[in-house]
Amino acid sequence: MVRPVLFGSMLLLCVPACKEGDKVPGYVDLSTFTVQPDPGEGSSSSNIPHAWAYAQDQLLGVWEAGSEIPVLAAGNVQLKLIAGVERNGSSADLVQYPFYDTWSSTINLVPGQRTSVQPTFEYYPDLSFWIADFTDIEIPFTFDVESDTDMIHWDAASHPDDVMPGGKRSGLLPG
């Protein structure tokens, strides 16, 4: 007998929280994030798992790719996304990626409806890039017998999941 009375009391306490006229959000569906590099900026390969989202310059939070963001606004809304990456590979420590420009678009939000966006990030203008061609014999690293670092090379045939476009990959490892 106590449980039904307790449940009924709790239900009555919650009813006043729902008011007629409360705003209904429009939703932004985030697809995967992509990168469109200009010539000389490397490949379009990226791993952008999160983005800081802003609507009308108001922070909506940090969202994962594939999320559905509720936005309490209607009509034309300026949406901005800042690419976020995991510092040191930890999803508990996110940072805004400092080399991608903010993605921005005006979208038309309708309360209760979903609007899909497919953000494509670009590098900030005037960045300098050094693209290492590890297939070339002229690698700009100096090898020294007293070095505490070893350079190793992978190729696409022996490590297909580890090698990015271009066919080879190198790494510096403590000796």
Image (spheres, rainbow, N blue to C red):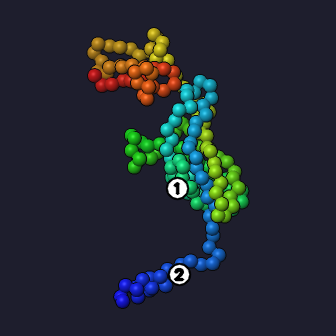
Residue type at mark 2: give it. Val
**Residue in the image at 66% along x and 64% along y:** 111
**Quadrant in which residue 21 is drawn:** bottom right
| Mark seen at residue 101 | none
Q: Residues within 10 Å of mark 1 (few under 14, many from 20)?
A: few
Residue 7 placement, left or right of 51: left
Query: Which residue is identified by label 2?
Result: 15
Q: Position of residue 150 (x, y in %)?
A: 32, 20
* Residue located 39% across and 44% down the image: 90
Disc 1 element = strand
Q: Which residue is mark 1?
A: 61
Q: Nearer the viewer, residue 113 or 132?
A: 113
* Mark 2 Cα shell of 10 Å, populated few (<14), some (14-19), many (≥20): few
Front: mark 2 or 1: 2
Q: Residue at x 38, y 14 (%)?
A: 142
Q: Earlier in the sequence, mark 2 or mark 1?
A: 2
- Answer yes or no: is residue 147 visible: yes
Q: Residue furthest top?
A: 137
Tell me how far mark 2 sits from mark 1, CA to CA. Answer: 28 Å
Q: Is residue 124 visible?
A: no
Residue 8: % across, % down = 45, 85
Instruction: Name above or below for residue 32 compared with residue 74.
Output: above
> Percent position (x, y) of residue 26?
64, 61
Viewed as shown, does residue 116 lie left or right of 8? right
Q: Is residue 143 above or below residue 74?
A: above
